[in-house]
Structures are given as C-alpha cells and as structure tokens.
Image (cartoon, grey):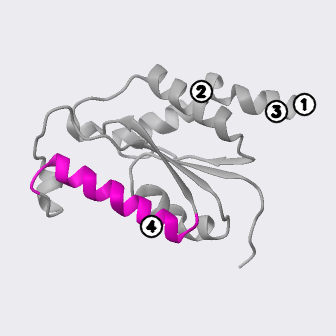
C-alpha cells in the first residue's frame, strides 16, 4: 500500500464512522487527523435504545467506552483524534449549523490539512447535518483562500 504525505483530515460524525468508512485510507496516511463531531455525553444521564442494545447501562457509560475505543483504534492507525463537544441526535441536543461551522472552521485553521473528507449525509440526521455544514461556503472559505495563494 502506498503511503501519502499529504495532511489528511477526516470529519467523522460519530466515534466509529471514520474508522469503519476510511480505515484503510487512514492507514495509508500516517498522522491523519480524525475530527469527530458528536462525542459528548448528554447533560443528564439517560439510557437510549441504542445504548442498551449495544450493551451499555446508560449514555455516560456508552460515551466513555466509545471515546476510549476511538482513541485506542486511532492510535493503532497512527491517526490523531479530535473530539468536538457536541451531542448526537439520540441525546436530544442537536447543535446549530453555526456552532458546528465555527468549531470545524477552528479545527481547519489549527491543522491546515491538504485534504479533507466528510460524510455524504445520506441517511442519519447527524450525518446530514455534518455534510450540510461541510458544503457551506462559510466552511469552505479557508480552502478557497488557500487555492488563491
């Protein structure tokens, strides 16, 4: 497998999305950055169907375990995790498009990647929200400026 030296940033809605969708690509891009958007537990503990079906007692346990798993897997792939402080839809605290745009814009400015991958947003509301944000002119402005220089 050929390795790339371009700085790759993968925008991942949930903690498992980047590895499940782009694991081989992450392996080919040592020091890739995986910016996961929905990594926070709910403000107050709860237990959703997904949490229980996945073997967790509650949301706090689920998010702790998923964050730890994400860090371990990305370390094996030599990728750098960035966890943004937003909650996914099942925890009933969807962030605004503006809040997402600002957080990801700061991530772009801090890391200045050469390539960015983001989800198509075909089904899940969290994926759609992240995809919509990544396609906005506001979020793409740093790339447009870089192309002009």
Residue at disc 2, secondary structure:
loop
**Which residue shows up at 12% across the image and 39% down it?**
45
Calculate the distance from the C-alpha at mark 2 to the C-alpha at mark 1.
21 Å
Indicate which disc residue 149 carries: 1
Reading the image, the residue beneath label 3 is: 146
The residue wearing badge 4 is 73
Q: Judging from the image, what secondary structure is the residue with disc 1 in?
A: loop
Q: Nearer the viewer, residue 52 or 84?
A: 84
The image shows residue 127 at horizontal and vertical percentages of 42, 43
The residues tagged by marks 3 and 2 sit, at their Cα atoms, a distance apart of 16 Å
Q: Label 1 near label 3: C-beta < 8 Å?
A: yes
Q: Which residue is mark 2?
A: 136
In the image, residue 113 lies at what x, y percent?
Answer: 71, 45
Between tags 4 and 2, which lies in front?
4
Q: Is residue 101 left or right of residue 3?
A: left
Dot 2, crowdedness within 10 Å: few (<14), some or many (≥20)?
A: few
Name the element at disc 4.
Answer: helix
> Given this view, does label 3 or label 2 mark the residue nearer the observer?
3
Check disc 1: other Cα within 10 Å, few if <14, some if 14-19, many if 20+: few
In this rendering, the count of numbered labels is 4
Q: Position of residue 100 (x, y in %)?
A: 47, 28
Residue extending farthest to the bottom is 1
Question: Which secondary structure type mostly characterizes the magenta part of the structure?
Answer: helix
Among the 4 quarters of the image, the one containing residue 142: top right
Range of magenta residues = 57-78
For disc 3, the neighbor class at 10 Å (few under 14, some 14 to 19, many from 20) is few
Circles 4 and 2 in contact, beta carbons < 8 Å: no
Residue 144's place in the image compared with 28, above or below, is: above
């Amino acid at each position: 497998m050929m390795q790339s030296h371009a700085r790759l940033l993968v925008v991942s809605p949930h903690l498992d999305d980047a590895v499940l969708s782009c694991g081989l690509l992450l392996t080919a891009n040592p020091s890739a950055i995986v910016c996961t958007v929905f990594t926070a537990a709910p403000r107050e503990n709860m237990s959703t169907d997904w949490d229980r079906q996945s073997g967790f007692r509650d949301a706090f346990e689920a998010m702790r375990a998923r964050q730890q798993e994400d860090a371990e897997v990305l370390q094996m792939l030599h990728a750098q995790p960035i966890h943004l402080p937003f909650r996914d839809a099942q925890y009933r605290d969807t962030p605004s498009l503006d809040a997402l745009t600002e957080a990801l814009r700061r991530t772009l400015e801090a890391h200045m990647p050469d390539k960015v991958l983001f989800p198509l947003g075909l089904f899940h509301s969290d994926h759609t929200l992240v995809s919509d944000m990544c396609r906005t002119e506001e979020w793409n402005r740093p790339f447009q400026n870089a192309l002009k220089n």
